């Protein structure tokens, strides 16, 4: 593999793979840094809705490998490594990764975000022993059991619906006074006979012995359960920037309407970008725009 490219895309989720595909189709020598696990947060999603090419929805584990295959066919190259450090500006970028350094004339940052933790007793202790962030991975292990989902956004209800296919009961705990997910998810979750939604419920500890046995609420109540799935938001992956670019209060990258950052030749798309709603179809649209903007930048 060469160490010099027209465009390097950092990120192996839907935004990164879509940007890589679009950049390669525009005729640029393109490298996509996918990280160790191709697909990002969407890999475990049973049904991605709103994508223009899949009217009935598509599973993440089907869509993301397809995007990579399309990108490879268009000429993009892929490296299963993460961006660790970014140096340079204005058409000359050096990207440091676990597999060495790469040079680029333009860079698209699509590094996404990782799940936020609760930072409560038991969360780390029982990770992999009842505490999870992946419903499709662990739902089969919890067949006919009671599980708790913490959170009230899209991911919480979407994963809750996935869990309800196997579990005997899914209890959704939201510390606020309302659910924040899309109306369609709220309607489906609240109508599901296996799903119970409880508002004003703050979890202060996850309890158990060799595995999870329940969650303790701030009001003193302990809810017995066999699994806990945490979906309280995401933390942007931007440590590689090392203060080279001003971020917003949530740690996200500001861009203009065409996904350009304050630094020439540097673009961002998807969850890592300020203003992105965190929906798969929108992240793909942003990635296509970022690739088109990178193309325009390289053409001067």
Image (cartoon, rainbow, N blue to C red):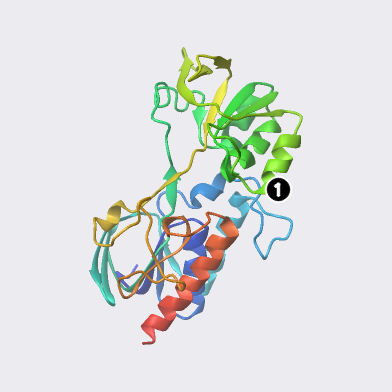
Q: Position of residue 293 (x, y in %)?
A: 44, 77
Q: Quadrant of residue 70?
A: bottom right
Q: Nearer the viewer, residue 2 or 265?
A: 265
Q: Is residue 2 above or below residue 199?
A: below
- Residue 23 visible, this angle: no
Q: Which residue is mark 1?
A: 184
* Vertical arrangement, residue 198 with respect to residue 211, above or below: below
Task: Report x, y in % for residue 207.
Answer: 47, 16
Question: In this rendering, does residue 106 appear at all?
Answer: yes
Q: Which residue shows up at 58% across the image and 26% down it?
A: 148
Q: Farthest residue toward the front? A: 177
Image location of residue 194, percent across then percent down: 73, 28
| Quadrant, the N terminus | bottom left
Q: Is residue 234 above or below residue 258?
A: above
Q: Which secondary structure lies at badge 1?
A: helix
Residue appearing at x 58%, y 35% in the figure: 177
Dividing the picture into quadrants, the one containing residue 7 is bottom left
Q: Quadrant of the C terminus?
A: bottom left
- The residue most toward the top is 209
Provide residue 15's location: percent of width, then percent of height. Answer: 49, 61
Q: Which of the 4 image quarters holds residue 152? A: top right
Count of numbered labels shown in the rendering: 1
Q: Dot 1: few (<14), some (14–19), or many (≥20) neighbours within 10 Å?
A: few
Q: What residue is shown at x 53% (from left), y 61% (from top)?
A: 283
């Amino acid at each position: 593999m060469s160490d010099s490219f027209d465009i390097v895309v950092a990120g192996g989720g839907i935004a990164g793979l879509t940007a890589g595909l679009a950049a390669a189709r525009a005729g640029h020598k393109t490298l996509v840094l996918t990280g160790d696990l191709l697909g990002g947060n969407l890999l475990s999603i049973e049904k991605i809705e709103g994508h223009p090419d899949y009217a009935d929805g598509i599973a993440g584990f089907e869509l993301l490998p397809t995007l990579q295959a399309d990108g490879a066919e268009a000429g993009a190259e892929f490296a299963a490594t993460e961006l660790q450090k970014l140096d340079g500006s204005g058409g000359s970028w050096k990207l440091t990764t676990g597999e060495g350094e790469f040079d680029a004339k333009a860079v698209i940052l699509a590094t996404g975000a990782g799940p936020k933790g609760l930072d409560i007793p038991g969360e780390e202790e029982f990770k992999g022993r009842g505490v999870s962030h992946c419903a499709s991975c662990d739902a089969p292990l919890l067949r006919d059991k009671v599980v708790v989902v913490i959170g009230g956004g899209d991911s919480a209800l979407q994963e809750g619906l996935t869990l309800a296919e196997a579990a005997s009961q899914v209890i959704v705990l939201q510390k606020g006074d309302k659910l924040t997910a899309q109306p369609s998810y709220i309607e489906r979750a609240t109508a599901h006979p296996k799903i119970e939604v409880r508002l004003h419920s703050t979890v202060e500890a996850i309890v158990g012995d060799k595995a999870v046995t329940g969650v303790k609420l701030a009001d003193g109540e302990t809810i017995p359960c066999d699994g806990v799935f945490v979906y309280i938001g995401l933390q942007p992956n931007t440590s590689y920037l090392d203060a080279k670019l001003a971020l917003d209060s949530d740690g996200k990258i500001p861009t203009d309407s065409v996904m350009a950052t304050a630094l020439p030749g540097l673009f961002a798309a998807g969850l890592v970008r300020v203003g992105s709603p965190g929906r798969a179809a929108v992240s793909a649209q942003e990635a296509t725009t970022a690739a088109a903007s990178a193309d325009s930048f390289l053409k001067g």
